[in-house]
Amino acid sequence: MPASLDYVATMHGVWRAGGIAIPLNVSSAVSELNHYLTCASVTRMIANGKYRESLVDLCADLNIELVSVDDVISDTASDLPTLVPERRAMMLFTSGTTNKPKGVVSTHKTISAQITTLIEAWSWTEDDIIPLFLPVHHIHGIINILSCGLWAGATVHLFAKFDIPTITAEIITGTYNVFMAVPTIYVKLIQYFDTITDAEVQKICDGFKPMRLNISGSAACPVKLFNQWRDLTGQILLERYGMTEIGMGISNPYNGERRAGHVGQPLPGVEAKLFDEEHNPITEENVPGEIRIKGDNVFLEYWDNEKATIESFVDGWFCTGDVAVIDNGYYRIMGRSSIDIIKSGGYKLSALEIEGVLLTHDDIIEVAVIGTEDETWGESVVAFVAVADGRQLEYETLKEWCNGKMSSYKIPKTLKLIDALPRNAMGKVTKPDLKKLI
Ligand code: MCA
Ligand code: AMP
């Protein structure tokens, strides 16, 4: 379900009944859903309308009971179980450096910690009104906006998608006092300003001006964007850093200096430290290391994947794979330790997962996927492909072939045909060499 009252009722129903809620992406391809449902051993799928229709065959194949919200919603509450905070509550699928996304399991305790931290740090109150137009199968939409809003008794306006004219119409009338989005959304708003009159732009910027808070996160906010947004709206963006496995970890302050290009300091209740490759903590400023996190906000486990869970912790610290420095007291993210993780439009993508799909194409014999810098999307997906002798491959044909095999944001935006992929002496593809070819 997209963001809707049915979504909220279902999520809370599953939680109160002691189940594990697994919110899924409404625009997933069937093969992606198949992986999530099988991996998570899902027993029951709740979907409405056209989404329900499209799931009939898949659920039948996987022996999953498919019901609509109306089938399960009731006026009279049954006796509900008493839940211990350690009970598993939610599983979100996230890409990593393995081929297929993994299920990140959080407990009621994890979720409560993630929410209460933000309520305190960002001064949520019941007077807040916020739009939710981000997808509701990720932390940003589910925890930072929806759950914090409900916990605080605030008002959350639910939108099934990010539709600029609809949302800006509300902003003009001063409906909202808090706004949270990924950097791509701010870029898209600024691009939209080029398509409307100056007077209309002014009205929208005047709607942003009195808000108490504008937040950017899920991907790096370029300094240029930070400055553009301040010049247009007077809003000093609060940038923060998070991850599916930890919720939010590090944030610029609500009161105090919000520094462009930096993500601030650990949130209340969250321990963060940088470590070098030998697992030694780094204490000096401006020395890069991996961000590691401890706290009640950290997830319980990767579902049914003990090996991955064990490997992602060292001495009780969760290893994020993000590299940062501390620069004059604030964390500054330098990038990720793996070239195979791409952040595009705020979505975390696995190059290996996309390569796995492309390799099923009859004409493709070799493929390597990388992310390149992109002003709108943060990073954009590029596929280097070697085709079989005598075969041709056009970008448009490949794009069409990809439809239905992966969500649209994973489909490569650029195709580079190449005779053979560059490899090192060990035969491993050297992706940094590919970056130089762009
Ligand atoms: C879509 N398109 C893209 C991409 N996505 N092109 C390049 N790169 C992309 N990533 C293309 C489509 O193929 C289509 O092209 C056209 O853009 C419109 O597609 P549509 O899906 O309608 O795009 P949109 O609605 O404008 O989507 C942009 C979006 C969306 C609203 C920014 O990407 C989004 O909601 N992102 C947020 C994801 C998020 O919530 N991440 C948080 C994860 P054509 O027309 O040619 O077919 S949680 C997280 O990261 C942690 C915990 C954290 O810190 O928050
Ligand atoms: P996800 O797995 O979708 O939760 O994505 C989490 C990843 O998003 C992190 O590991 C970071 O690489 C990235 N990320 C989130 N917030 C920021 C930020 N403010 N700056 C840079 N990267 C970020």
Image (cartoon, rainbow, N blue to C red):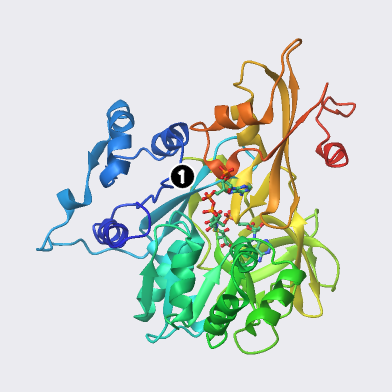
Callout count: 1
Q: Does residue 135 lie above or below 101 as drawn?
A: below
Q: Does residue 266 lie above or below 80 as drawn?
A: below
Q: Quadrant of the C terminus?
A: top right
Q: Which residue is mark 1?
A: 303
Residue 145: which quarter of the image? bottom left
Q: Residue at x 62, y 69 (%)?
A: 193
Q: Is residue 68 visible?
A: yes
Q: Position of residue 268 (x, y in %)?
A: 57, 79
Residue situated in front as seen by the camera: 313 or 385: 385
Q: Position of residue 270 (x, y in %)?
A: 58, 72
Residue situated in front as seen by the camera: 26 or 399: 399
Q: Position of residue 302 (x, y in %)?
A: 50, 47
Element on which disc 1 rests: loop
Residue 391: which quarter of the image? top right
Residue 21 lies left or right of residue 345; in this view the side is left
